[in-house]
Structure formats: C-alpha cells, structure tokens
Amino acid sequence: MKKEIPITPKIKIGIVGGTGYTGAELLRILVRHPHSTLAVITSRAEAGLPVAQLFPHLRGQIDLQFTAPDDNALSDCDVVFFATPNGTAMQSAPQLLDRGVRVIDLAADFRLKDPAVWAQWYGMPHACPDVLAEAVYGLPELNRAAIRQARLIANPGCYPTAVTLGFLPLLEAQVIDPNWLIADAKSGASGAGRKAETGLLLAEIGESFKAYAVTGHRHAPEIAQTLGQLGSGAVGLTFVPHLLPMIRGIEATLYARLTDDNCDLEQLFAKRYATETFVDFMPNGQPDTRSVRGSNMCRVAVARQGTSSVVIVQSVIDNLVKGAAGQAVQNMNLMFDWDETLGLDALALLP
C-alpha cells in the first residue's frame, strides 16, 4: 500500500513596499517557496501596475498587480513582510497583530528596544513602544528558539548581521575585551536602497571608495545592543561603514583584543557554527563577497598576525539576502516550524 505524504497547506503572504531591492529579493525567493502563496503586494506609487512589468525577471512567475496599502487586505494574510522605509511598519503592525497576522519588518522599527534610543537615531517618536517590547530580533543563529514562538520579528540590518556573526563566538566564549571592538565594514551600493540619488550614480561611485557616517551610523546602536547581550553587558564599539563601487555584498573586517592568548580560535569558530546551515566557517580562508552573491550564506574566517593579541575576523554576506530578504524568509520558516532552508537553497553566482 502506497504511503500517503502529508501535504503542508500554503500560507498567504503580503508584502508591503514591494518595489525596492529588498522587496524584489523577497519576491524572487517567495515565488519558489513550496509553502507560500503571494496574495498582496503593495506600492502607493505603482498601484495597478503588474508586478512582472516592473520586474521582468519575474515574468511567468507572478501575475499579481501592485495595490495601494490596505490593512483589511493585509489582514487576510498569514504573514506580512514590511520592506518599507523606517517608520512605516510601526504604524500598521499593532492592527495586524491584533487580527492574528504575523509580522516581519525588514526596516529598523522594532530593532532597538529603547524607544528613546530609537527617537534619537531615527528622528521620530516610536509609534507603538508597547508592541516594541515583544519584538524578537531575527538573527536565527542567536535567537532561534524565540523566533519560533514570535508574532513579530525585527529583521536585523545588513551591517549588523555581518558584524554580529563575526564577533559572536568570541563574545560568547568571553575570550576578548568587550570594550575594544572595531568593525571596519564595506557595502555595495544596493545597501542604500532603490532610489535616484546623485551620490549613488555610477559616475559618482565608480572607481572610488569612501567611508561615510564616520561620526555615527544608525546601525551602531543596533550592533552594540546585540553584542552587549552576548558577553558582560555594554560593549565599546567603533563602527565605520564604507561604500564600495559594486552592487551587492558586505565585507566586515573585525578587530578585537584577546584576553585569552591560548584560545584555539579556529576550533572555537568551527564548533560554534558546526550546525549552522547558513554560516560557513573557512579555516585559513579568505572570504570574499563574490562567494556569497545571491545566496543566504555568511562566510567567516579568523586569524592572528604572529603573536599579536589582536584577533581579526572576516565576515561576508550578500546584503540583500542574508542581510535582508533571505534572512526574513529564514525567520518565516522558523515561525511556521518548517525547515529553515526552504526557498533558500540557491548557490552563489559565479562570476
């Protein structure tokens, strides 16, 4: 007698803000997800336009049109992704949660636990501090159990993902000085979003390389908040982002001072990430952004120079996948108790 295979019912998905780079990545991943059906894709500017007309790479994969944001339509979904500017998700999330919809925010609305810190860095009061308290920070390698039970996920930023996964084993093992952490990070231009801006034109960034937000970047308090939960409290972090003349990718070179010179760094990283599908520790390796382009993988390596007490970690991700849409889908998989790799098995593109 042939054994019946149980069929997992598909869930209905809504995407708010489906016209940006992260929205496009969500669409690319979710149209091939075995347990999801795209039901609503919103855009104020493109309402009525077929999605595949704006994104020709989705022709034959999706026949929906963009619609104006409508909380009633979104309330019929099982989960709603917000791929919107900062300050948008917090306006609608409480109503959706009250109606039983799970929410995954790819912006920063629910990442910072202190509303005063949010207001300081984002220039507006937080619209729902009571809901903010229940948001789970969606870094699966750190908060997997809490994500499984969550109604509201704060999807980590791209820089924070790369930096946190690099420092995480060292801080957990308490083998570095938490008061002396340096994150020298570089991103491709897609990290700034899909918008027309002079400073992001090819003629402006091509054949050039620069640091920006040197006096303080919005991702710094997010990184410090998460790293502070790994060790002995507050950390001393210097974070400097840079803009690279490429489209995708983040490379973070991280520095810390060892407090245990006898620590076997390679064994520490290998053990911590041995069971993590989307973190690849490379012994004696040199991770590059090309090796993760288009994938949900983070690749890391660790090194010391001679007998120096400074440990150097290299961490690379695709900022639009593991740094945004891919990690959001990984969180969705966990929330619905599925294999967290569903829809995320794409290999990196080469060349």
Image: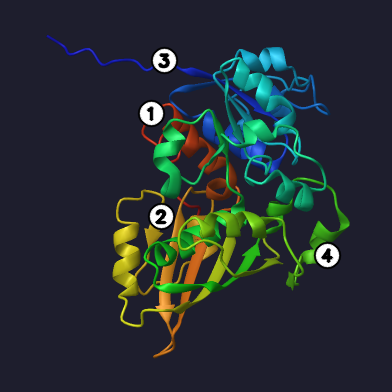
Q: Does residue 62 show up?
A: yes
- The residue wearing badge 4 is 204
| Label 3: element kind | loop
Closer to us: 277 or 60: 277
Residue occupying the far right of the picture: 198
User: Which residue is found at the position 62% from the left and 45% from the top?
Assistant: 113
- CA neighbours of label 2 inside 10 A, class few (<14), some (14 to 19), many (20+): many
User: Residues at badges 1 and 3 in contact (C-beta under 8 Å)?
Assistant: no
User: Which residue is found at the position 68% from the left and 19% from the top?
Assistant: 95
Splitting the image into 4 quarters, where does residue 305 fall? Answer: bottom left
Q: Is residue 288 above or below residue 39?
A: below
Q: Amino acid at mark 3?
A: Pro
Among the two numbered marks 3 and 4 on one chain, the one whose residue lies closer to the N terminus: 3
Judge depth for marks 1 and 4 and give the one in front: 1
Judge depth for marks 2 and 1 and give the one in front: 1
Judge depth for marks 1 and 3 and give the one in front: 1
Q: Amino acid at mark 4?
A: Glu
- The residue wearing badge 1 is 337
Q: Using the numbered discs, state the Cα–Cα distance from disc 2 to disc 3 in whole angstroms.
A: 29 Å
- The residue wearing badge 2 is 279
Among the two numbered marks 2 and 3 on one chain, the one whose residue lies closer to the N terminus: 3
Judged left or right of residue 248, residue 78 is left
Closer to us: 294 or 113: 113
| Label 2: element kind | strand
Res. 9 mark: 3
